[in-house]
Amino acid sequence: MKSEESQFPEKKPQGKTIPPYMKAISGSLGGIMEASCLQPIDVIKTRLQLDRSGNYKGIIHCGTTITRSEGVRALWKGLTPFATHLTLKYTLRMGSNAMFQSAFKDSETGKISNKGRLLSGFGAGVLEALAIVTPFEVVKIRLQQQRGLSPELLKYKGPVHCARMIIREEGILGLWAGAAPTVMRNGTNQAAMFTAKNAFDVLLWKKHEGDGKVLQPWQSMISGFLAGTAGPVCTGPFDVVKTRLMAQTRDGGALKYKGMIHAIRTIYAEEGLLALWKGLLPRLMRIPPGQAIMWAVADQVTGFYERRYLLGAPL
């Protein structure tokens, strides 16, 4: 009979941590699950943010209008770039955050301060914004703003065709339209999210990374949901401006918005202060549940690795 100590190891071998590549894998699997569940909410959010004439009266009216006039499939417009973008984004986010945290850890204690955690999250957010999020969201938003399902009536026939058209008409930098507000949004979001997720894990479940405790999926979902709520409220204006900058094309001549600051001032002058938080409710309907889904998957993957390969627990 195995001793109690061998059945329930309490201590991780010193110096061993979950490697960044494992965090990256956990993020990619979580991203696939999230994209599959929440694409319709993202389509509705984009349509609301681009609605300047008040065609949509709210989330439900927007969803029903899209379904009635364009069919149910229209709620999954842009799914291919969205799913690819989420998977790559979470892979880079989780992996780079783990690498940044390793750099900020105290060399003697192996612990990371809240400041180090914030900086690691911000760095991961900036990196994902420039490398992945901006070009994928430009393509996704251009596809989502098109109305109808008949290919012959649509300017962009699909993700690849859309990217080629943007490069041909606007140059390669057209895929990075709205990069500045995207960097600000993602950097702030991830700084808050990683710090809050760790805090909620400790506060609610007494879970510390490396302690061998694997959270139940419902526990990860609660921590992830709560951690995902602050970012959308704080970064609403950046998200609206990002969407407007990404959606505008040169078809009608000069661009309406010249950059992030000009867009904020123009939206405020023409539509009022609250317009900078357009689409907040669907963002809150998508991001916190998305984080809940992603962390439920990611925590199980990293928890399995931690128990099996770092603590030597039996399967």
Image (cartoon, rainbow, N blue to C red):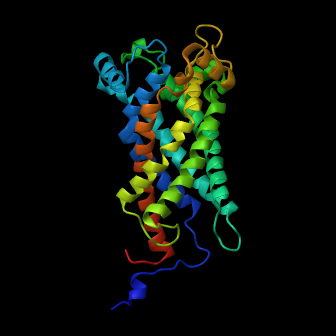
**Horizontal and vertical percent position of residue 127:** 64, 44
- The reply, left or right, for residue 147 in relation to residue 122 is left
Q: Position of residue 202 (x, y in %)?
A: 49, 64
Q: Is residue 195 visible?
A: yes
Residue occupying the point 58% across, 29% down: 237
> Which residue, as the protein is rendered here, is positioned at the far right?
107
Where's the C terminus, which quadrant? bottom left
- Position of 42 relative to 131 (above/below): above
**Up/down of 133 relative to 1, above or below:** above
Residue 54 x/y as whole percent: 43, 14
**Residue 277 drawn at (x, y percent):** 52, 28
Residue appearing at x 59%, y 33% in the figure: 134
Where residue 75 sits, quadrant-wise, is: top left
* Outermost residue, front side: 273
Q: Is residue 97 above or below residue 54?
A: below
Q: Looking at the image, which residue is at 45% across and 41% down?
A: 287
Could you say which is closer to the camera, residue 264 or residue 243? 264
- Quadrant position of residue 15: bottom right
